[in-house]
Amino acid sequence: MSLPDANPASPTPRAPAGVRPAPACTLVIFGAHGDLTKRLLMPALYNLAGSGLLDPAFRIIGVDHVASTTAQWRDGLTEMMQSFTHDPNAEFHAPSINATQWKWVCDRLDYVQADFGDLAQIRALGEKIDGNAIFYLAVSSRFFAPVIEMLGRAGLVAETGGHFRRVVVEKPFGADLRSARELNRRILAVLQESQVYRIDHFLGKETVQNILAMRFGNLLFEPLWRNEFIDHVQITAAETIGVEQRGAFYEPTGALRDMIPNHLFQLFGMVAMEPPNSFSADTVRTSKEQLFEAVRPISPTDAVRGQYAAGTVEGKPVIAYRDSPGVAADSTTETYVALKLHVDNWRWAGVPFYLRTGKSLGGRRTEVVVQFKKPPMMMFRDTETHELPPNRIILNIQPAQGLTMEMGAKRPGPRMDLADVQVRFRYEDVFAQSPNVGYETLLYDCLMGDATLFQRADNIEAAWRAVDPVLQAWAGNGTGLEIYPAGATGPKGADKLLERDGREWYPLDGA
């Protein structure tokens, strides 16, 4: 299947004013036939090409064990790109595919059939690479260390002649503290830390990066960003979808491993880290590492887990998790987790952070709710206002993108009576929006050698260290596992986790 013919002599698009195109590079994608490549990496490269951020000498080599030719791989990718134009649920959805822009990408595709564990085949791959190269591991996590070790044995990651060699590693980065340490050990036996780009696509979202801009670019917020004024913080990543056909992956993983040490800890880091003195990669990542080290290891008594049963989500019936393909009939894997974090530093002492994530819930949203302490009632005690609502700043990540502020305002009329009102900023109301999958910024940064939005080894291990006591307590048993119906807000124990502190979750159908 093909797109309409494009101008064969079409030039490389020009980058926006003030933005430097990436240097010439060969991007080698291990796992060329996988969903990650087809659904996320290729649309991101298409968008980067259209923005003029890729060098004319940029090349893409797909590597997989599947028997295929370059033409067959290209045609399969083209068919997938076309399918996105009529799939509103796709991560990348555009009304049409620009034929000239996609041809620019297709002209730079090459496919190599290879066994990841065959040294001779990996060495032969190296004959196609000259100069700068990035090796993207879009493969199962069990291949991370073996592929990197094979690249090292083949001499493909040595940085010589002024050229860079980098490796991008997808999550999950380990399954617990022990395995994360072992994976780091094996990788860093081959590569320098500066060559490793541990990617978390959450950090590619504009609204996640906007947390730093909001905190540190506005005097309005940062002076209040401390325990003197903030009562607590909630970080939510709620999904309406279930595990669907991913049961075989999810069953040994669960919600905690899948979401907490990476996605939610990255949001936590953005919200709670100390102000770095610059946006250089090591400075920002050191601020995060210091925060993660200050997190008190989470007690199992501050953790709740649940698993969804059959129910209804958005008017559609949903089967129980245990009835999903690849899932054990007596599974104790959690599809929901809620945690309470304590940070033992001067800024956050006494301020609890509540994290929750789950599948098949009644609402889809990723957001951070910063709730401030209530002002004193003294001057309002003789008015119609019987209780002052707390101020909140809500960082909306998805599906809404922007920021919401909740504050008290006087109701019209002769009496002093306060109402809780919202002030909203939405990205789409201010900035032009273009289809993207969140990988564009991360791929560009990797090409440019900017590791600010990528995780360092110590960041990874510190996050696992915080959750390890909970993982150990839950290992191999169903103690404390609560069943909740699909379409609910989660297990009752999650509500009790906050109720015992005199607090409650911000509603999933809120701002």
Image: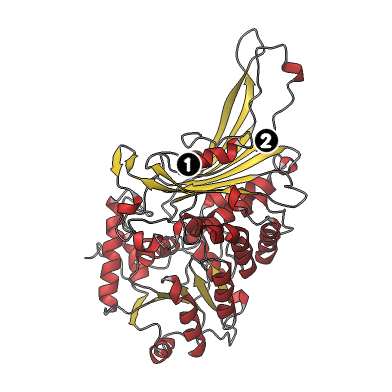
**Which residue does the image show at 62% across and 54% down from the upper left?**
298
* Residue designated by label 2: 372
Q: Classify residue 230 as left or right of residue 478.
A: right
Q: Classify residue 326 as left or right of residue 475.
A: left
Q: Nearer the viewer, residue 82 or 29?
A: 29
Residue 245 percent coordinates (x, y): 31, 58
| Residue 283 higher or lower than 363, as above or below | below
Q: Is residue 394 visible?
A: no
Q: Tell me the amino acid under the disc marked 2.
A: Phe
The quarter holding residue 391 reads top right
| Residue 475 higher or lower than 142, as above or below | above
**Which residue does the image show at 39% across and 88% down from the upper left?**
118
Mark 2 lies on a secondary structure that is strand
Q: Nearer the viewer, residue 459 or 256?
A: 256
* Residue designated by label 1: 428
Q: Is residue 115 visible?
A: yes
Mark 1 lies on a secondary structure that is helix
Residue 463 percent coordinates (x, y): 61, 61
